[in-house]
Image: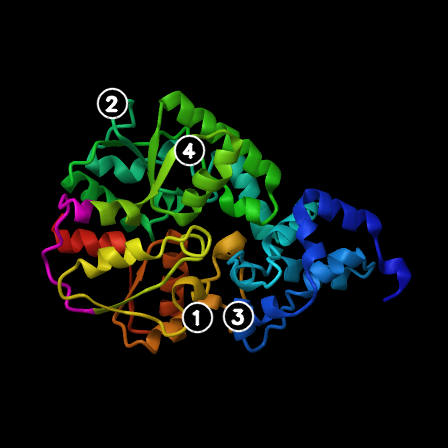
């Protein structure tokens, strides 16, 4: 490597922005071998080279536009699944290193256009779809739900995708039917609560994350919310892990956690048999990053007639990412480069008739793959399966 290609300023900036773990890496290559992209035949994504290049200051140093464009594309390939962190013998958090690099790229406007557009949409409308803030709770009108008030035990936040996207709205609707049947004291959050921006933070939009976090924390404090139910693992980790560091004291509960408790307390009783073979996909954010593995399975096992099967070698901690995290949901992958397609192939081998999910992002990715691959497989959120069996 020519000495002029090394940029100490870039290296130091990356370290200052959170990339210190780069120095812990000793290039064993475990991360590359365990990265979900390693399972895609035509993709050569060398994860271990990222901390190596950071240490050398060899990030974005080329003067050739085509080489820079290719490097940017590769740096946004990481979907933040944390499988590398789970098995790294040195405990290197490559996700932190990648996020630090991306923060520089975002500051210099060097990111994929679709992700750039998402930032603008959130700033203008409070959600990544760019729809009007006052329409956030339109999905709930048919239930005539009240907004959260201090006399309620819980506030329910549906996540931007179920709130605005018809494809996954059924997740929020099924959840509401369950909460009403169980006579849970709750109200929905107002449109003052914006997108949590966990995903945007992971692809480098740190300023957007900090700005929206303050908006949301202020809205939650003003409403007096103490307990929040969320359908999305991304909202869960934002409020539980990220926002708590910023002074947000709200207790966060993922729907599968609440459903499992409601079943134990016999407030929800699944009675209608399903009589189908079902496989559950562990979302990276709910599983590896928050250690919620058993509650979703407990809910599924409570449904009469449901035969729960596992994806051999690739379940729980070893689950393979759907590809939606860290902005992957909004990137245009080339044919043959969709992680969700790879995951669907693994699922097919189980003989399952239904793929159960617990994340709106996963549902979108898998439904799209099933459609394009022309596979006879239903994709359903756990809330849908439970609501159907409980007769809500």
Q: CA distance from mark 1 to mark 4?
A: 33 Å
Looking at the image, which residue is at 40% across and 67% down? 369
The extreme front residue here reads: 89
Q: Are marks 4 and 2 in contact (CB under 8 Å)?
A: no
For the residue labelled by badge 1, is the local secondary structure a helix, a strand or a loop?
helix
Q: CA distance from mark 1 to mark 3?
A: 8 Å
Q: In x, y percent, where is residue 82?
A: 52, 58
In the rendered structure, does residue 268 fall within the stretch colored magenta? yes
For the residue labelled by badge 3, is the local secondary structure a helix, a strand or a loop?
loop
Left or right, residue 109 beside residue 388: right
Q: Are marks 2 and 3 in contact (CB under 8 Å)?
A: no
Residue 151's disc number: 2
The answer to which image quadrant residue 386 occupies is: bottom left
Q: CA distance from mark 1 to mark 2?
A: 46 Å
The range drawn in magenta is 262-276
Residue 133's disc number: 4
Query: Which residue corresponds to mark 3?
Result: 337
Query: Which residue corresponds to mark 1?
Result: 341
Looking at the image, which residue is at 59% across and 57% down? 91
**Number of the front mark, 2 or 3:** 2
Q: CA distance from mark 4 to mark 2?
A: 25 Å
Residue 71 or 276: which is nearer the viewer? 276
Whether residue 58 is visible: no
- Ranked by sequence position, the earlier of labels 4 and 2 is 4
Please, is residue 27 above or below residue 19 in the view? below
**Number of the front mark, 3 or 4:** 3
The extreme left residue here reads: 271
What is the chief secondary structure element of the magenta stretch? loop
- Ranked by sequence position, the earlier of labels 1 and 2 is 2
- Ranked by sequence position, the earlier of labels 2 and 3 is 2
């Amino acid at each position: 490597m020519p000495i002029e290609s090394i940029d100490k300023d870039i290296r130091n900036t990356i370290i200052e922005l959170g990339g210190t773990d780069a120095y812990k890496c000793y290039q064993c290559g475990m991360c590359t071998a365990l990265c979900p992209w390693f399972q895609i035949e035509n993709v050569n994504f060398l994860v271990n080279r990222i901390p190596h290049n950071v240490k050398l200051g060899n990030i974005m140093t080329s003067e050739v536009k085509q080489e820079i464009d290719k490097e940017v594309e590769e740096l946004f390939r990481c979907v933040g699944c944390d499988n590398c962190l789970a098995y790294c013998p040195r405990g290197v958090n490559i996700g932190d290193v990648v996020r630090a690099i991306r923060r520089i790229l975002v500051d210099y406007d060097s990111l994929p256009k679709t992700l750039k557009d998402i930032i603008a949409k959130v700033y203008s409308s409070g959600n990544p779809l760019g729809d009007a803030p006052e329409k956030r709770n339109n999905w709930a009108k048919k239930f005539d739900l009240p907004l959260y008030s201090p006399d309620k035990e819980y506030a329910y936040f549906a996540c931007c995708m179920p709130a605005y996207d018809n494809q996954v709205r059924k997740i929020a609707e099924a959840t509401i039917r369950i909460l009403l049947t169980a006579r849970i004291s709750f109200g929905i959050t107002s449109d003052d609560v914006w997108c949590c921006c966990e995903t945007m933070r992971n692809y480098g939009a740190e300023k957007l994350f900090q700005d929206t976090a303050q908006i949301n924390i202020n809205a939650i404090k003003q409403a007096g919310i103490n307990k929040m139910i969320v359908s999305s693992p991304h909202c869960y980790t934002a409020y539980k892990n990220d926002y708590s560091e910023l002074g947000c004291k709200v207790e966060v509960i993922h729907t599968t956690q609440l459903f499992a408790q409601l079943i134990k307390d016999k407030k929800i009783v699944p009675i209608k048999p399903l009589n189908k073979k079902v496989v559950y996909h562990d979302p990276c954010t709910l599983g590896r990053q928050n250690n919620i593995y058993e509650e979703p399975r407990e809910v599924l096992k409570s449904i009469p007639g449901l035969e729960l099967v596992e994806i051999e070698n690739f379940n729980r901690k070893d689950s393979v990412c759907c590809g939606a995290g860290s902005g992957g949901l909004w990137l245009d992958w080339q044919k043959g480069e969709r992680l969700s397609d790879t995951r669907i192939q693994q699922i097919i081998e189980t003989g399952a008739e239904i793929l159960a999910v617990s994340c709106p992002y996963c549902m979108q990715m898998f439904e799209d793959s099933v459609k394009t691959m022309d596979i006879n497989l239903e994709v359903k959120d756990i809330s849908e399966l439970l609501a159907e069996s409980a007769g809500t």
